[in-house]
Image: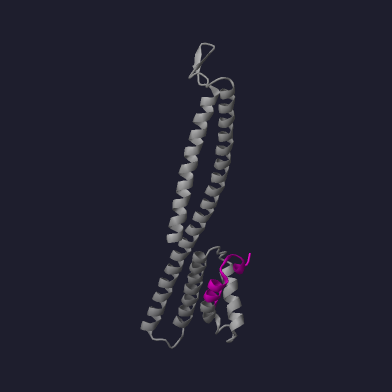
Amino acid sequence: MSLSAVINPAALDNVLGSLATLFLRSAGGNLPTARQAAARLLAGYEAETEQELRLAADIVSFGCQALDALDRSIAPDLPEDECRSLRASVVTLNRQSERLQRRLDQLRRDRHELAGDAEALAVADMIVTREAAGLIASARQALANGGAPPDKIRHDGFHVWPRADMRHHAARRIAETFVRKKTRLCREEAFAMAG
Protein backbone atom coordinates (compact mmCIF):
# COMPACT_ATOMS: atom_id res chain seq x y z
CA MET A 1 0.00 0.00 0.00
CA SER A 2 1.34 3.40 -0.88
CA LEU A 3 1.85 6.06 1.76
CA SER A 4 -0.53 8.44 0.00
CA ALA A 5 -3.35 5.92 0.44
CA VAL A 6 -3.25 6.08 4.26
CA ILE A 7 -1.56 9.38 5.17
CA ASN A 8 -2.84 12.93 4.76
CA PRO A 9 -1.25 14.21 1.49
CA ALA A 10 -0.21 17.54 3.02
CA ALA A 11 1.59 15.80 5.90
CA LEU A 12 3.25 13.38 3.49
CA ASP A 13 4.37 16.23 1.22
CA ASN A 14 5.86 18.09 4.18
CA VAL A 15 7.81 15.02 5.36
CA LEU A 16 9.05 14.15 1.88
CA GLY A 17 10.17 17.75 1.34
CA SER A 18 12.21 17.65 4.54
CA LEU A 19 13.78 14.28 3.81
CA ALA A 20 14.51 15.08 0.16
CA THR A 21 17.21 17.53 1.24
CA LEU A 22 19.16 14.58 2.67
CA PHE A 23 19.21 12.89 -0.75
CA LEU A 24 19.82 15.89 -3.01
CA ARG A 25 23.59 15.38 -3.20
CA SER A 26 23.32 11.70 -4.11
CA ALA A 27 20.46 12.51 -6.54
CA GLY A 28 22.67 14.99 -8.39
CA GLY A 29 20.57 17.95 -7.25
CA ASN A 30 17.41 16.50 -8.82
CA LEU A 31 14.61 17.21 -6.33
CA PRO A 32 12.01 14.76 -7.78
CA THR A 33 14.57 11.93 -7.63
CA ALA A 34 15.48 12.87 -4.05
CA ARG A 35 11.78 12.91 -3.07
CA GLN A 36 11.28 9.52 -4.71
CA ALA A 37 14.23 8.08 -2.77
CA ALA A 38 12.77 9.44 0.48
CA ALA A 39 9.31 8.06 -0.39
CA ARG A 40 10.72 4.59 -1.07
CA LEU A 41 12.58 4.53 2.24
CA LEU A 42 9.50 5.69 4.12
CA ALA A 43 7.27 3.15 2.38
CA GLY A 44 9.41 0.39 3.89
CA TYR A 45 8.23 1.44 7.36
CA GLU A 46 4.55 0.92 6.40
CA ALA A 47 3.32 3.88 8.44
CA GLU A 48 -0.46 3.99 8.78
CA THR A 49 -0.83 7.10 10.91
CA GLU A 50 0.80 10.52 10.84
CA GLN A 51 2.55 9.80 14.14
CA GLU A 52 4.07 6.63 12.65
CA LEU A 53 5.07 8.61 9.55
CA ARG A 54 6.87 11.21 11.69
CA LEU A 55 8.73 8.49 13.59
CA ALA A 56 9.69 6.74 10.36
CA ALA A 57 10.91 10.04 8.90
CA ASP A 58 13.02 10.68 12.01
CA ILE A 59 14.50 7.18 11.82
CA VAL A 60 15.44 7.71 8.16
CA SER A 61 16.82 11.18 8.92
CA PHE A 62 18.99 9.99 11.83
CA GLY A 63 20.21 7.03 9.80
CA CYS A 64 21.24 9.27 6.89
CA GLN A 65 22.93 11.75 9.21
CA ALA A 66 24.82 8.91 10.91
CA LEU A 67 26.02 7.58 7.56
CA ASP A 68 27.11 11.06 6.51
CA ALA A 69 29.02 11.59 9.78
CA LEU A 70 30.67 8.18 9.42
CA ASP A 71 31.67 8.97 5.85
CA ARG A 72 33.20 12.32 6.90
CA SER A 73 35.03 10.70 9.85
CA ILE A 74 37.17 8.53 7.58
CA ALA A 75 38.61 11.44 5.61
CA PRO A 76 42.42 11.05 5.64
CA ASP A 77 43.24 14.69 6.46
CA LEU A 78 40.71 15.04 9.29
CA PRO A 79 42.14 16.02 12.70
CA GLU A 80 41.82 13.34 15.40
CA ASP A 81 39.51 15.47 17.59
CA GLU A 82 37.03 16.00 14.76
CA CYS A 83 37.20 12.31 13.87
CA ARG A 84 36.31 11.32 17.45
CA SER A 85 33.54 13.91 17.56
CA LEU A 86 32.02 12.62 14.30
CA ARG A 87 32.18 9.00 15.50
CA ALA A 88 30.53 9.98 18.79
CA SER A 89 27.80 11.66 16.73
CA VAL A 90 27.35 8.42 14.77
CA VAL A 91 26.84 6.48 18.00
CA THR A 92 24.38 9.07 19.35
CA LEU A 93 22.40 9.17 16.09
CA ASN A 94 22.24 5.37 15.95
CA ARG A 95 21.00 5.17 19.54
CA GLN A 96 18.35 7.78 18.81
CA SER A 97 17.29 5.89 15.70
CA GLU A 98 17.02 2.61 17.66
CA ARG A 99 14.95 4.34 20.36
CA LEU A 100 12.58 5.72 17.74
CA GLN A 101 12.35 2.30 16.07
CA ARG A 102 11.28 0.76 19.40
CA ARG A 103 8.66 3.49 19.79
CA LEU A 104 7.38 2.87 16.25
CA ASP A 105 7.20 -0.88 16.89
CA GLN A 106 5.25 -0.24 20.11
CA LEU A 107 2.78 2.02 18.30
CA ARG A 108 2.19 -0.72 15.72
CA ARG A 109 1.66 -3.35 18.42
CA ASP A 110 -0.79 -1.04 20.20
CA ARG A 111 -2.66 -0.36 16.95
CA HIS A 112 -2.96 -4.08 16.17
CA GLU A 113 -4.06 -4.82 19.74
CA LEU A 114 -6.75 -2.12 19.52
CA ALA A 115 -7.92 -3.56 16.22
CA GLY A 116 -8.19 -6.97 17.91
CA ASP A 117 -10.09 -5.40 20.81
CA ALA A 118 -12.47 -3.72 18.35
CA GLU A 119 -13.19 -7.10 16.76
CA ALA A 120 -13.74 -8.65 20.19
CA LEU A 121 -16.06 -5.77 21.11
CA ALA A 122 -18.05 -6.31 17.93
CA VAL A 123 -18.45 -10.01 18.78
CA ALA A 124 -19.37 -9.18 22.39
CA ASP A 125 -21.90 -6.62 21.14
CA MET A 126 -23.44 -9.25 18.88
CA ILE A 127 -23.64 -11.74 21.79
CA VAL A 128 -25.19 -9.15 24.11
CA THR A 129 -27.76 -8.29 21.46
CA ARG A 130 -28.59 -11.96 20.94
CA GLU A 131 -28.84 -12.56 24.69
CA ALA A 132 -31.04 -9.49 25.14
CA ALA A 133 -33.35 -10.78 22.41
CA GLY A 134 -33.47 -14.11 24.25
CA LEU A 135 -34.32 -12.39 27.53
CA ILE A 136 -37.08 -10.41 25.86
CA ALA A 137 -38.51 -13.60 24.33
CA SER A 138 -38.36 -15.35 27.75
CA ALA A 139 -40.11 -12.43 29.43
CA ARG A 140 -42.84 -12.43 26.78
CA GLN A 141 -43.34 -16.16 27.22
CA ALA A 142 -43.48 -15.83 31.02
CA LEU A 143 -46.04 -13.04 30.72
CA ALA A 144 -48.08 -15.12 28.28
CA ASN A 145 -48.06 -18.03 30.78
CA GLY A 146 -49.52 -15.86 33.51
CA GLY A 147 -46.46 -14.53 35.29
CA ALA A 148 -42.82 -15.09 36.01
CA PRO A 149 -41.51 -18.58 36.87
CA PRO A 150 -40.72 -19.34 40.54
CA ASP A 151 -37.26 -18.48 41.91
CA LYS A 152 -36.17 -22.11 41.92
CA ILE A 153 -37.54 -25.25 40.34
CA ARG A 154 -37.13 -28.66 41.93
CA HIS A 155 -35.78 -31.14 39.41
CA ASP A 156 -34.78 -34.68 40.46
CA GLY A 157 -34.28 -33.58 44.05
CA PHE A 158 -31.99 -30.64 43.21
CA HIS A 159 -32.67 -26.96 43.19
CA VAL A 160 -31.80 -25.46 39.81
CA TRP A 161 -32.08 -21.96 38.44
CA PRO A 162 -34.82 -21.44 35.90
CA ARG A 163 -33.61 -21.07 32.32
CA ALA A 164 -34.71 -17.42 32.22
CA ASP A 165 -32.61 -16.60 35.30
CA MET A 166 -29.57 -18.34 33.80
CA ARG A 167 -29.99 -16.29 30.63
CA HIS A 168 -30.36 -13.13 32.67
CA HIS A 169 -27.14 -13.79 34.62
CA ALA A 170 -25.22 -14.76 31.47
CA ALA A 171 -26.46 -11.68 29.65
CA ARG A 172 -25.52 -9.45 32.59
CA ARG A 173 -21.98 -10.92 32.72
CA ILE A 174 -21.58 -10.48 28.97
CA ALA A 175 -22.87 -6.90 29.16
CA GLU A 176 -20.48 -6.08 32.03
CA THR A 177 -17.56 -7.54 30.06
CA PHE A 178 -18.65 -5.56 27.02
CA VAL A 179 -18.81 -2.31 29.01
CA ARG A 180 -15.34 -2.93 30.55
CA LYS A 181 -13.79 -3.61 27.14
CA LYS A 182 -15.54 -0.66 25.54
CA THR A 183 -14.34 1.61 28.36
CA ARG A 184 -10.76 0.35 28.01
CA LEU A 185 -10.85 0.84 24.24
CA CYS A 186 -12.16 4.41 24.59
CA ARG A 187 -9.47 5.18 27.19
CA GLU A 188 -6.72 3.78 24.92
CA GLU A 189 -8.03 5.75 21.94
CA ALA A 190 -8.02 8.92 24.06
CA PHE A 191 -4.44 8.26 25.17
CA ALA A 192 -3.40 7.58 21.56
CA MET A 193 -4.95 10.84 20.40
CA ALA A 194 -3.36 12.77 23.26
CA GLY A 195 0.04 11.13 22.70
Number of numbered markers:
0
Task: Judge whether 55 appears above or below 179 on screen.
Answer: below
Q: Residue 117, how many percent across, how many down?
A: 52, 48
Q: Residue at x 39, y 75 (%)?
A: 88
Q: Is residue 119 visible?
A: yes
Q: Residue at x 57, y 83 (%)?
A: 26
Q: Residue 149, how many percent across, how many down?
A: 53, 20
Q: Quadrant of the C terminus?
A: bottom left
Task: Judge whether 89 appears above or below 101 on screen.
Answer: below
Q: Residue at x 45, y 86 (%)?
A: 76
Q: Quadrant of residue 123?
A: top right
Prevalent SS, magenta region: helix
Task: Judge whether 9 appears above or below 185 on screen.
Answer: below
- Within the magenta stretch, is there residue 169? no
In terms of depth relative to the viewer, which is nearer, 24 or 171? 171
Q: Quadrant of residue 28?
A: bottom right
Q: Residue at x 46, y 85 (%)?
A: 75
Q: Residue 186, how many percent across, how many down?
A: 46, 51
**Farthest bottom residue?**
77
Q: Residue 27, how many percent across, how many down?
A: 59, 83
Q: Is residue 195 visible?
A: no
Q: Quadrant of the N terminus?
A: bottom right
In terms of depth relative to the viewer, which is nearer, 133 or 106? 133
**Farthest right residue?**
1
In terms of depth relative to the viewer, which is nearer, 18 or 34? 18
Range of the magenta residues? 1-16
